[in-house]
Image (cartoon, rainbow, N blue to C red):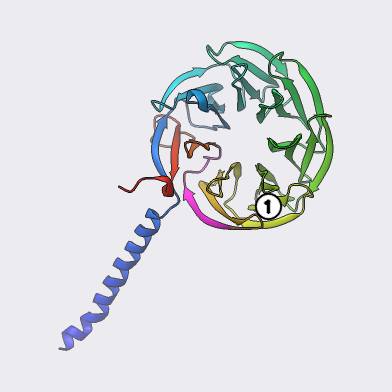
Amino acid sequence: MQQKECSRPRVLAIIAAAFTILQYANAGEREPLVRVATIELKGKPGTLDHVGADWTTSRLFVANEINDTLDVVNLKTNKLAKQVASQKEIHSIAYSPDSKRIFVGSGGGACNVLDGTDYTLLKSIPVPDADSVRFDPRTQHVFVAGENQIAVIDSKSLDLLATVKLPAPPHGFQVARLSHRVYVNVGVPCQVAVIDTEKNELVARYPLDADKGIGPLALDEPGHRLLVGTRRNPRLAVLDQDTGKEIASVPIPEGSDDMFWDAESKRIYISCSSGFVAVIRQIDRDHYESVANIATVKGAKTSAYDPTAKRLYVAVPRQMGKEAPEVWVFEPRSDRKSP
């Protein structure tokens, strides 16, 4: 009898440990994103920068910065189709489906324009310290973040139309679809700079409490909300699109670099260099909550989101023991069929 009594705590401890393991396993199963594929690239260890896409032809464009190549991935086969060389310090890619041209932001000091079919260089347009690139389908203009400026390029004539001076170096930015505005994160001092795309001039500044860095930006235009990722004091700041007033704030992992708003699911996806994808849910346009931080690897800071296929593509630098850098493909668990 005494032996049985002495073994009871041991049994209870085993049961508790088993319950904890099961609890963590179930928590993993409930994660809002699940990795469904891994795409192998080519290249040495080092930085991968921003990811672009032509969803109509199922092509993903990866800025393989350490390799100085534009990596083209066939999303029908999930295979690397081509590496376009001589893209010095490549940072970002935008695609114009109408002109079938690829615009590459090169830190070497240019926006390189490539033929979207055979990838030959059509023109190199000087833009000092060129970084992020965005295409506006309404105006057919391409916007390139450069050294304290946004360059505006006609995607058909390839003429440099304007240069809009900014109060500080630009970081993430987005082109509005429902108004003639471009919203640019700049810093330091950190603020959102608002550009009128009809006049190509700065028309407003929204100060941000983020003195140690600012990262990506996304738009919820129907909700009139700007979604801004801050760094070092890492959070998602939600601003009123019309006034710049901060409405809400949610903690996120460090190193946010790309962000996407999915209007259908009311979810925000933020890829962070600290090794996570933050998933945040919009309760309503004034209230937000963290759903999960999905583990990736350190340095996996950039991504692209296909709003139709509901797939998130995360660029993963080459890891120790691996033969190449990769792209990890995630799907929302709620959108998957039950096994």
| 116 displayed left or right of 174 | left
- Residue 163 position within the rendered picture, expressed as x and y whole percent measured from the top left: 80, 25
Above or below: residue 6 compared with residue 99: below
- Residue 69 position within the rendered picture, expressed as x and y whole percent measured from the top left: 54, 21
Tell me if residue 112 can be seen: yes
Above or below: residue 33 compared with residue 87: below
Q: Is residue 88 magenta?
A: no
Above or below: residue 123 compared with residue 105: above
| 169 displayed left or right of 9 | right
| 146 displayed left or right of 311 | right
Q: In what element is the residue under mark 1?
A: strand
Q: Toward which corner of the image does residue 16 lie, by quadrant?
A: bottom left
Disc 1 residue type? Val
| 92 displayed left or right of 161 | left
In this figure, what is the number of numbered marks?
1
Tell me if residue 127 can be seen: no
Residue pointed to by mark 1: 238
Label 1 neighbour load within 10 Å: few <14, some 14-19, many 20+: many
Q: Which residue sits at x=24%, y=75%?
A: 11
Q: Quadrant of the N terminus?
A: bottom left
Above or below: residue 118 compared with residue 256: above
Toward the viewer: 179 or 121? Answer: 179
- Residue 118 position within the rendered picture, expressed as x and y whole percent measured from the top left: 53, 11
* Residue sticking out furthest to the bottom: 1
Q: Which residue sits at x=72%, y=51%?
A: 239
Q: Which residue sits at x=55%, y=14%?
A: 119
- Residue 300 position within the rendered picture, expressed as x and y whole percent measured from the top left: 52, 40
Highlighted magenta segment, given as a residue range: 289-302
